[in-house]
Image: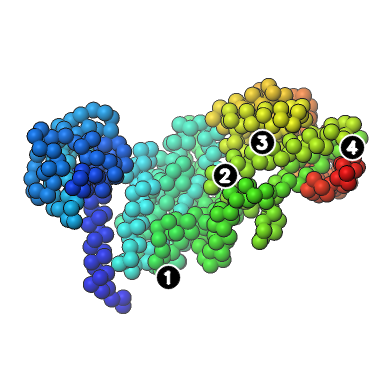
């Protein structure tokens, strides 16, 4: 049996008192003698519309007669006052001055009109998600922090839930249907919970479940299975039916007490591991995953320095004309020459860049380095090469278009020699996915390629209308095409489609002469793969003699 000391009870009492103040429906301020606001609870922050801490209370509350600062310390005193809400409007309120401790007084604010309804509604909006009516991230974190406080020795389980295939629902049916799916999933999660469990929407299609008192991993796994079963049931939408699945990460607090941020990070790591296993899977956090998390955090801390300190390098994979066999270009592939871990592939650090808001910096570096290297090569070549650079949807925007134009001008490179490769998700015709910026790049003369074509959910109508120049058939259809009639039929159909739309067609993943010949006979124009050359740094490419000569100069 675990024995709680007097200090444990004192700490827990203080924590619960703090939690009660934060979640009170009445706006509450802690004000120092000079009028500086030391604390504002959630209701006060919603009412006044700013963080408040450090602000002068006189800027939001005024009284007739003595100022509020002059009245501080008068425990129990009430006064009528005028409050300036965050909307800029003024309203009459009643102030009650509470106990004074160490020169700081508690000031409770009550609105005179619809006090019970309006204040509680404001608090509800501050603590709940508007769409699903579940708890929001901030209130969920507060609850987890409360239950994992140092005075609490119970075991708990935190379950992180991320929907699989939700983007396809949004792209295929529209955001209104996507919202309906989120509401239905939220309803199912509530019905799958025990009394006392807390379910929240953390943002987008990510949910979380807090299960107090679960000490047994078997019980937590049973919860995950129940959630997956509920989520995967078909969802009727108007006259149609759709479905989604979920990836789930679980972390237990039985063995050690963890900070809330640590708990969320571990559950998130387990969830991403589950997502990597395929849809509809769950993973329980363990020591091995912990080591991966340590490595991930180390990369997060050092990636910014790597970009700054030139630890990144580009490797180039040749692009070959299938009719002549000549190199016509190269795809620039980024690598990280880590001082301790060695050469890291993009799969190890690009997700880190996405999670730490470094993707734009990383992409900008790749773009500038690739254009600069190509310009250097083309100065000694009779026939200029092209270079392809992969770009994430999130990078596309007006700043990116300007960046491309500036790099091309700086290196005096013809825009037609640069190809921007994007994934199929961009080909949805939705402006917010960056499709409009493809048109601006194309107007500059830059060529646009759809990478890994055939693996996504692209719209053929959008493909026809967008300024796309190149289709790259995914290696899943190309590798082994010489031995598979089904793969051959797919490759030939995509090649015919591309040519009908005046597009060049590239076969990715060629690894032997048989697949090379099959791709050529099926109508592909260009190809790349290990059969021609493995990706290599600029000073090591052996597929272009003039470049080798340049290297020796």
List the residue tagged with mark 3.
422
Question: What whole-number distance in Å separates the C-alpha atoms at marks 2 and 3?
Answer: 18 Å
Depth check, mark 1 against mark 2: the one in front is 2
Considering only vertical position in the picture, is 531 above or below 236? below
**What residue is at 19 percent from the left and 51 percent from the top?**
104
Say whether disc 1 or disc 4 marks the residue closer to the N-terminus.
1
Residues packed near mark 1 inside 10 Å, few (<14), some (14 to 19) or many (20 plus): few
User: Which element is circle 4 on?
Assistant: loop
Q: Nearer the viewer, residue 521 or 337?
A: 337
List the residue tagged with mark 4.
326
Say whether disc 2 or disc 4 marks the residue closer to the N-terminus.
4
List the residue tagged with mark 2.
358
Q: Quadrant of residue 424?
A: top right
Question: What whole-number distance in Å separates the C-alpha atoms at marks 2 and 4?
Answer: 37 Å
Task: Assess whether mark 2 and mark 1 are in contact (beta carbons under 8 angstroms).
Answer: no
**What residue is at 25 percent from the left and 55 percent from the top?**
18
Question: What whole-number distance in Å separates the C-alpha atoms at marks 1 and 4?
Answer: 62 Å
Say whether disc 2 or disc 3 marks the residue closer to the N-terminus.
2
Say whether disc 1 or disc 2 marks the residue closer to the N-terminus.
1
Question: What whole-number distance in Å separates the C-alpha atoms at marks 3 and 4?
Answer: 25 Å
């Amino acid at each position: 049996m675990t024995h709680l000391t007097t200090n444990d009870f004192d700490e827990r009492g203080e924590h619960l008192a703090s939690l009660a103040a934060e979640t009170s429906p009445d706006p509450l301020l802690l004000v120092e003698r000079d009028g500086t606001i030391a604390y504002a609870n959630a209701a006060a922050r919603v009412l006044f519309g700013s963080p408040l801490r450090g602000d002068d209370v006189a800027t939001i509350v005024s009284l007739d007669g003595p100022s509020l600062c002059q009245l501080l310390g008068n425990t129990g005193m009430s006064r009528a006052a005028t409050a300036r809400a965050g909307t800029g409007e003024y309203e009459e309120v009643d102030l009650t001055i509470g106990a004074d401790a160490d020169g700081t007084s508690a000031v409770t604010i009550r609105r005179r009109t619809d006090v019970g309804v309006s204040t509680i509604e404001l608090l509800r909006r501050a603590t709940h998600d508007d769409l699903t009516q579940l708890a929001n991230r901030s209130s969920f974190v507060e609850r987890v922090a409360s239950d994992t406080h140092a005075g609490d020795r119970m075991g708990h389980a935190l379950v992180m839930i991320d929907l699989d295939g939700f983007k396809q629902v949004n792209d295929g049916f529209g955001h209104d249907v996507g919202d309906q799916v989120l509401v239905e999933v939220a309803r199912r999660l509530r019905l799958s919970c025990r009394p006392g469990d807390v379910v929240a929407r953390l943002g987008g299609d990510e949910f979380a479940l807090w299960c107090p008192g679960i000490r047994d991993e078997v019980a937590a796994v049973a919860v995950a299975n129940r959630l997956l079963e509920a989520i995967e049931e078909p969802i009727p939408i108007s006259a149609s039916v759709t479905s989604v699945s979920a990836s789930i990460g679980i972390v237990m607090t039985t063995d050690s007490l963890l900070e809330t941020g640590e708990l969320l990070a571990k559950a998130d790591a387990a969830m991403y591991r589950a997502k990597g296993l395929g849809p509809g899977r769950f993973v329980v956090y363990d020591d091995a995953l912990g080591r991966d998390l340590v490595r991930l955090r180390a990369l997060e801390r050092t990636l910014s320095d790597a970009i700054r300190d030139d630890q990144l390098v580009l490797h180039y994979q040749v692009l070959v004309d299938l009719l002549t066999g000549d190199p016509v270009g190269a795809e620039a592939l980024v690598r990280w020459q880590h001082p301790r871990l060695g050469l890291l592939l993009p799969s190890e650090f690009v997700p880190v860049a996405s999670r730490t808001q470094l993707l734009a910096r990383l992409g900008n570096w790749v773009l500038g380095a690739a254009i600069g290297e190509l310009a250097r090569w083309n100065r000694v070549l009779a026939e200029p090469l092209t270079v392809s650079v992969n770009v994430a949807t999130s990078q596309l925007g007006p700043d990116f278009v300007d960046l491309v134009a500036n790099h091309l001008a700086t290196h005096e490179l013809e825009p037609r020699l640069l190809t921007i490769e994007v994934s199929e998700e961009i080909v949805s015709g939705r402006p917010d996915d960056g499709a409009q910026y493809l048109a601006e790049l194309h107007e500059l003369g830059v060529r646009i390629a759809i990478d890994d074509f055939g693996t996504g959910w692209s719209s053929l109508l959008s493909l026809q209308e967008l300024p796309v120049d190149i289709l790259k058939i995914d290696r899943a259809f190309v590798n082994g095409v010489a031995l598979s009639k089904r793969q051959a039929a797919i490759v030939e159909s995509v090649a015919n489609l591309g040519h009908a739309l005046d597009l060049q067609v590239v076969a990715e993943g060629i690894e032997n002469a048989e697949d090379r010949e099959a791709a050529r006979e099926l109508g592909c124009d260009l190809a790349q793969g290990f059969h021609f050359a493995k990706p290599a740094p600029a000073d090591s490419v052996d597929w272009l003699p003039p470049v080798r000569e340049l290297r020796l100069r």
